[in-house]
């Protein structure tokens, strides 16, 4: 009698198409089993306390950085990115683990609140409790940095974690679990499950206490809908169409250098990568001239050969191609590259100019090494066009004097002034977006608190001769409250 084989899938080296590994496709029953084990482990993990968890997390971060060559090679194999980029990604992720481990206690410390005049006999406190077991669903573009930005904060807060990596980078996801298990005091604190979209869907409805999703806006909507059926709260970190605003007083050399890197590095597959530039018309020609000169020294190639690698996901090539075509059809022009810059699996740099705002190339996330440069009359126009997007993830502003003023008017979650990507590497600040870019935050105190809930505890310190919350209440006590309220104009606090 033939035995039933566990279904599996392959991950690939995107530069060659060769198989990089084979992994099981876990079904809902298997996912539920893993989640149940993680639930059982949660109490013990909480009981370890902040200092116990800190020790484990710091040991994990040390182990990861000691094996940076091994993990960077694996990230490079599964994504196609240069090994140097993978090492930078690993280093930043390790910084987040250390920060979460060291700051969890202070962020979750019980806070004391003023009880207000009416309740002056009470003490009022707010405790922070871990939610229990957190599900993390990750993308492939930064397969270490992105999921670790949820995993380590959830763990530091006292939750156990079940992680479903992208089907393009399952090997990296397994490596994270394996290295954690080397430092873990017991099993089931952090587990990786593998599979395709349906495995992620099963995690959403498995009874986890919170889900942290990073990926496309399209999938985020499915995830939010699935989580709604079990009242599972979600953090959604989705795509973007990040603008770069360049004022006439900007340091153009630096602005061009950073913008081209932001747009092209990692083959343009960065959620916070520059996709559209709004440059003051007074300096626009110079900006374009410098960008074109720089592009001549940037090329795509296999790891070890290019400044950036292939498109990790073969289907993305079609999206990039269609955006380039619609940009030209809608009236844009090439400043560098052309339709023949796309030679799957590689896409050489493309710079487009004067693309109308209603073109798909300006509205939708391209996720490729292309950049559109549009002129604006002034900074007000740049702000309005930046904000006229359905996305609101990050933005970059280049100006010597107007950076803060412009940043304060942008409808997005993160702004870097005279820099790019930097907020992702600062562990103390929250990362996330608005509108189609999602909701909730990862990183920083706000990101850690996502994996906790507030428990209010009030306590009677002494008894008042009033019986407001009792059937013994007298009419004159009611009158006193009304008089007090009128007198204090509602200022009880
Ligand atoms: P994706 O949405 O295709 O997949 C993300 C994850 O969701 C994968 O693990 C996938 O298996 C899983 N999934 C697919 N269908 C599912 C379902 N029905 N239920 C549950 N899970 C499901 O995204 P991707 O292509 O892996 O990643 C690229 C996208 O991620 C881009 O849009 C990028 O901008 C975004 N991203 C955002 C951030 C951020 O922090 N905001 C960071 C990195 C990437």
Image: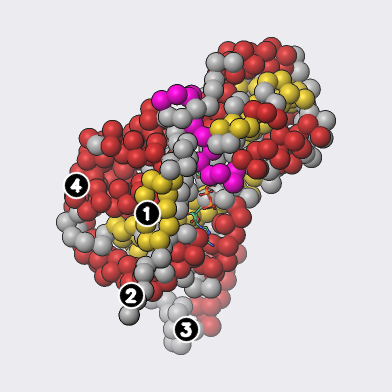
Report which residue position mark 4 lands on. 55
- For the residue labelled by badge 3, is the local secondary structure a helix, a strand or a loop? loop
Q: Nearer the viewer, residue 390 or 379?
A: 390
Q: Is residue 288 above or below residue 440?
A: above
- Give the number of the mark in front: 3 or 1: 1
| Sequence-earlier tag: 1 or 4 | 1
Q: Position of residue 240 (x, y in %)?
A: 60, 42
Q: Position of residue 392 (x, y in %)?
A: 62, 43
Q: Which residues are magenta?
A: 304-316
Contact, mark 1 vs mark 4 (Cβ under 8 Å): no
Q: Position of residue 492 (x, y in %)?
A: 50, 60
Crowd rating for badge 3 (residues with CA inside 10 Å; few <14, some 14–19, many 20+)? few
- For the residue labelled by badge 4, is the local secondary structure a helix, a strand or a loop? helix
Report which residue position mark 1 lands on. 22
Say whether residue 290 is magenta: no
Report which residue position mark 2 lands on. 3
| Sequence-earlier tag: 2 or 1 | 2
Crowd rating for badge 1 (residues with CA inside 10 Å; few <14, some 14–19, many 20+)? few
Queried on whether the Cβ of the residue with tag 1 lies below 8 angstroms from ligand 1, the answer reads: no
Report which residue position mark 3 lands on. 473
Spatial CA distance of label 2 from label 4 is 44 Å
Report the side of 308 relative to 379 (left or right): left
| Sequence-earlier tag: 3 or 2 | 2
Q: Position of residue 360 (x, y in %)?
A: 74, 41
């Amino acid at each position: 009698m033939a035995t039933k084989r566990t279904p599996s899938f392959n991950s690939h080296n995107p530069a060659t198409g060769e198989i990089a590994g084979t992994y099981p496709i876990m079904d809902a029953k298997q996912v539920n089993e893993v989640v149940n084990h993680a639930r059982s482990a949660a109490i013990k993990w909480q009981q370890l306390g902040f200092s116990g968890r800190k020790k484990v997390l710091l040991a994990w971060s040390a182990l990861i950085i000691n094996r940076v060559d091994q993990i960077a090679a694996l990230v490079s194999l599964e994504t196609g990115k240069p090994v140097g980029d993978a090492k930078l990604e690993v280093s930043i992720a390790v910084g987040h683990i250390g920060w979460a481990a060291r700051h969890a206690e202070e962020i979750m410390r019980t806070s004391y609140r003023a009880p207000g005049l009416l309740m002056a006999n009470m003490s009022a406190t707010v405790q922070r409790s871990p939610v229990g077991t957190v599900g993390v669903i990750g993308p492939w573009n930064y397969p270490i940095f992105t999921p670790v930005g949820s995993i380590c904060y959830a763990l530091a807060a006292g939750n156990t974690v079940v992680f479903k990596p992208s089907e393009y980078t399952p090997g990296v996801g397994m490596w994270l679990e394996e290295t954690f298990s080397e430092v873990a005091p017991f099993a089931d604190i952090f587990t990786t499950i593998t599979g395709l979209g349906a495995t992620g869907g099963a995690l959403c409805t498995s009874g986890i206490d919170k889900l942290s999703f990073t990926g496309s806006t399209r999938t985020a909507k499915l995830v939010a809908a699935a989580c709604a059926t079990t009242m599972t709260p979600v953090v959604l970190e989705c795509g973007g169409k990040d603008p770069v605003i360049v004022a006439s007083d900007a340091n153009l050399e630096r602005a061009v250098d950073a913008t081209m890197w932001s747009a092209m590095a990692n083959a343009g597959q960065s959620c916070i990568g520059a996709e559209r530039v709004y440059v003051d018309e007074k300096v626009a020609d110079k900006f374009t001239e410098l960008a074109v000169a720089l592009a001549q020294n940037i090329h795509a190639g296999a790891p070890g050969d290019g400044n950036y690698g292939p498109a990790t996901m073969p289907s993305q090539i079609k999206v990039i191609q269609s955006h380039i075509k619609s940009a030209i059809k809608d009236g844009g022009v090439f400043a560098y590259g052309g339709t023949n810059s796309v030679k799957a699996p590689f896409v050489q740099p493309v710079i487009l100019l004067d693309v109308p705002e209603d073109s798909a190339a300006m509205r939708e996330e391209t996720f490729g090494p292309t950049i559109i440069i549009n002129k604006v009359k002034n900074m007000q126009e740049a702000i309005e066009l930046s904000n006229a997007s359905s996305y609101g993830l990050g933005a970059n502003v280049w100006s010597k004097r107007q950076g803060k003023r412009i940043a304060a008017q942008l409808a997005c979650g993160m702004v870097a002034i005279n820099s790019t990507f930097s907020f992702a590497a600062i562990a103390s600040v929250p990362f996330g977006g608005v509108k189609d870019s999602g909701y909730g935050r990862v990183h920083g105190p706000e990101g850690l608190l996502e994996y906790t809930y507030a428990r209010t505890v009030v306590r009677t310190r002494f008894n008042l001769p009033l019986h407001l919350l009792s059937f013994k209440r007298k009419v004159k006590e009611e009158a006193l409250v009304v008089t007090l309220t009128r007198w204090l104009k509602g200022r009880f606090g």
